[in-house]
Amino acid sequence: MDSSRALYADPGLPDRIFRGVARGGGGLVLAVMLLVGGFLLYRAWPAIDRARWSFLTTEAWEPDAGNFGIAAVMVGTILIALVAIVVAVPLALCGALYISEYARPGIRATLISVVDLMAAVPSVVYGLWGLFFFEGAILPTARWIATYLGWFPPLGVVGVDPTDPLSTETVYTSSTFIAGIVVGFMVAPIICSVMREVFSQAPAGEREGAYALGATRWGMIRTVVLPFGKGGMIGGTMLGLGRALGETIAVYLIISPVFVIQWHVIQSGTSSVSSLIALRYGEASPFGMSALMAAGLALFVVTLIVNFAASSIAARSRSGAASDA
Amino acid sequence: MTLAPETPPSVKEERRTVLPASLPRPVEPAGERRRSLTLTRATDTYALVGSAGGAIGLTALLFVWLLPFNGVVGFVLSAYVLFLALYALVVSFDEDGPTVRDRIAGVVVRSLGLVMVAALAYVVVFTLWEGRRALPHLNFFTQDMTLAGPLDPLSAGGILHAIVGTLEQITIALVLTVPAGLVCAVFLNEVPGRYARFVRTIVEAMTALPSIVAGLFIYATVILSLGTGKSGLAAALALSVMMLPIIIRASDVVIRLVPGTLREASYALGTSRWRTAWHVVLPTARSGLTTSVILGTARGVGETSPVLLTAGFTAEMEANPFEGAQVSLPLAAFEFVKSPEPAMIARGFGTAATLMALVLLLFVLARVIGGRAPGQLTRRQTHRRVLASRRDAERFAARAASPTAARAQTVPSDTSFRSSP
C-alpha cells in the first residue's frame, strides 16, 4: 500500500548560497527604495504637520513665514504636463503608425533607431532649443491664439489689449504653453517607441483578414491595429505623462516662476514642483527644506498614481506586455 | 518578359520573342484589361500635387489680404488645413467614402510622422549648429574654466573639468548600479515568489521617482545630514538612485524573454539553479542586458536635475570625486547658458553638443553590441560555436576509435553542465 509523502527537493549548498545572494540583492534594492520613500516622508513630515490641509490649498511659497502650499505649483505642473500630452500624443501616434504601417521596410529600421535615439537625448538639449529658438518662433502664434481665441478663458491673457498692435509680446513669453510644447517634443519619442512596439505586434492574420474583407489601409488600422494597441497607447501616454510631470531642466529654463494659480496657459509666468525645488533648495532653511521635501513627495505621489494606472491599464489589455519603459 | 494573355494569336505564329512594347497596340477583348500592380496612380499624384499647390497659393492670398495671422507657424498651419480640405474635395470627385478617408488618414499620418521626426532632428541639429562656434577651438576640450571669465573669448577656457566629472560620476554610478541591478533582475526571474513580486512592484513604483526628487533625497541625506559637502560622489549617488530602477526594469524585461524551454532543458540535465542562471540565462540574455545597461547609462549621463542639487558648481578641475564640487557636462551646459554673455552661451551649446555626441556614441555602442534577440549570435560567436562543435566531434571520433583509451579518459572538463552534488 503506497502512502502519500511530502515532496521535498534538496537544492544543495551552492543553490542555497545562490538563492541567498539573489534574495540579498533583491532585499538591498528594496531597502534602498523604501529608504528613499521613507526618508522623504520622514523629512517632509514637519512641514506637512504644520501646514495640514492648507498645504494643498495655499498658493504662496513662504515656508519660513508658515504660509506655503502646493496649489499653485501643482496646478502649474499638471497644466504643463497636459499641454505636453496634447502636443505629444498626436505626433507620437502618427509617428508610430507611420513607422509600423506606412514606411517602406528599407527605412523602417533607420526610423526606429532615430526615434529611440531621440528618447535618449538629454533634457537640457531640449531646454536650450526651447529657450533659444522655439520661444521666439512661437510668439506670433501665441499672440494670435490670445487675440482670436481669448474669449475662452484659459487661452486669454490678462492685462494686455490684444488689438493694440504696439503692445509688448513679452507677456506671451515664458508661459505654460511654450514650456508644455517643449516638454511635449521631449516626451513624444518616448510615447512613440512604446506605441510602435505595440502596433508592430498586431497579429498578421487579423490584418490580412481585414484586407480580405475589402478594407482600405486606414480601415485596417482603425479596425485591427488601433483596437489591438489600445492598452499600449494608453500605457505609453501615461508613461509620457509621468515623465512630463517630473521634468525639471527644460521647464526651469523656459518658465518665469510665479506662485499664484495661473490658469491662463498663454500668459507669461507659471510654476512647477520640480522647478520650485531647483529654484529654492539652495537658500532653504531646515524647515524650508522640509517643505520642499513635502512638495517633492506630493509630486512623487502624483507620478506614482499615473504609473500604476498605466501599468494596470496595460496589464488588462491584449497588448499590455509591450508597454515597458 | 512573358507574353501577356491578350496578345493576339498572330504574334505567336512568328515563333520568336517579340517585346510587347514594339507591337502594334492589340485590340483588347471585351472585359479584359491589362492591370498595373503598382499602388500609386498618376491621378493620385496629380491630386496630391494639385491640392498642395492650390493650398499654398490660397494661403498666400489669404495671408496677404484676409487672415489676421502672421508668422511662419501660422502660414504653415493654415496651408496645411486648406490642403487637407482641398485634397479631400479632389479625391471625392473620383472615389467613394472609405477611400477618401483612407487618403486623408494616410496624408495626416505621413505628415505628422514626418513633423515629429523632423522636429526632433532639428533639436539635435540646432544644438550641434549652435555649438559650431565653440567646438573648433581645441582648448575647449583641453582646459577648464579657471582662467576664463565670462567676457573672455572662446579661445580661452574649456570644459575638460566637466568631461572628467561626467566620466567619473557615471563610472561610480555604474559600479554601484550594475551589480545591484543585475542581481536584482536575476532574483526577480530565477527565485520567483511572493517576495519577488513585492520587490518588482516597488521597483516599478520607483521608476516613477522624479529625478529631481532623487537629487533632493541625496542632498538631504548625504549633504545635509552627514555633513559632507557637495561632491562628485554625492552626484553619483543621486544618479544611482535614479538609474537603479531603470536598469532593473529593463534587465527584468530582457531576462523574461529568455525562452523557458532553455531553462527546462538545463534543469532536465540535472543542473542546479545557479548554474542554470550563470551558464544558460545570463549568456542568452547578454546582448539585451548590455543594451539595457548602456541605455540606462545614456539616461544617467544626460540627467541634469539630480546633479544640480548634489554636485555643486565649479570652474576648476576637480579630479577627486570624494570631496569638493565637481561639475558635469549637462550641469555645465545649464550653468553656461544662464549667463547673458554670447561667449558663455556658445560654450553652453558646445557643451550640450559634446554631451549629445557622448550619448550618440553610447547609443551606437548599444546598437552594435545589442539589438539581437536572446540566443541570436553574431558571426564571430557562430564561428566559435562551430569550432567548439568540431572539436567535440573529433574527440568523440577519437574516443570511438580507441576503446581502451576512452575508458582511461575522464569526463571532459570543458562541459558546463555537470550534475549538482
Image (spheres, rainbow, N blue to C red):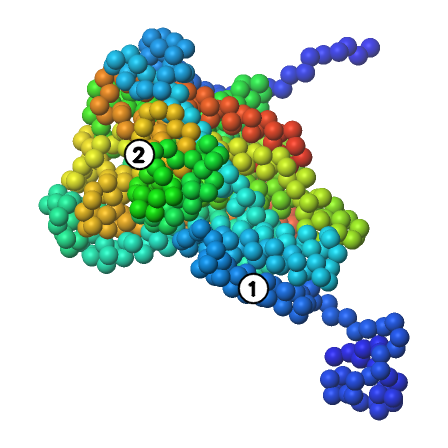
Residue on which the image places disc 2 = A256
The amino acid type, in three-letter code, at marker 1 is Gly
Q: Nearer the viewer, residue A160 or A36?
A: A160
Splitting the image into 4 quarters, where does residue B54 fall? bottom right
> Contact (CB < 8 A) between labels 2 and 1?
no
Question: Mark 1 = which residue?
Answer: B54
Crowd class of label 1 (few under 14; some 14 to 19; many from 20; radius 10 Å): some
Residue at (65, 56) in percent of width and height: B88
Tag of residue B270: none
Query: Which label lies toward us, 2 or 1?
Result: 1
Q: Would residue A134 be visible to someone looking at this image?
A: no
Residue B164 x %, y %: 24, 42
Three-letter code, disc 2: Ser
Q: Is the N terminus of chain B in the top left, top right, bottom left or bottom right quadrant?
A: bottom right
Chain for numbered disc 1 = B
Would you place residue B400 above or below residue A85 in this image?
Answer: below
* In this view, A1 is above or below B239: above
Q: Find the distance from the CA under tag 2 to the CA under tag 1.
A: 42 Å
Vertical side of B88 occupied by A309: above or below: above
Residue A20: % across, % down: 48, 21
Residue at 70%, 58% in the rendered image: B92
Name the side, left or right, on which B398 lies relative to B322: right
Q: Secondary structure at mark 2?
A: loop
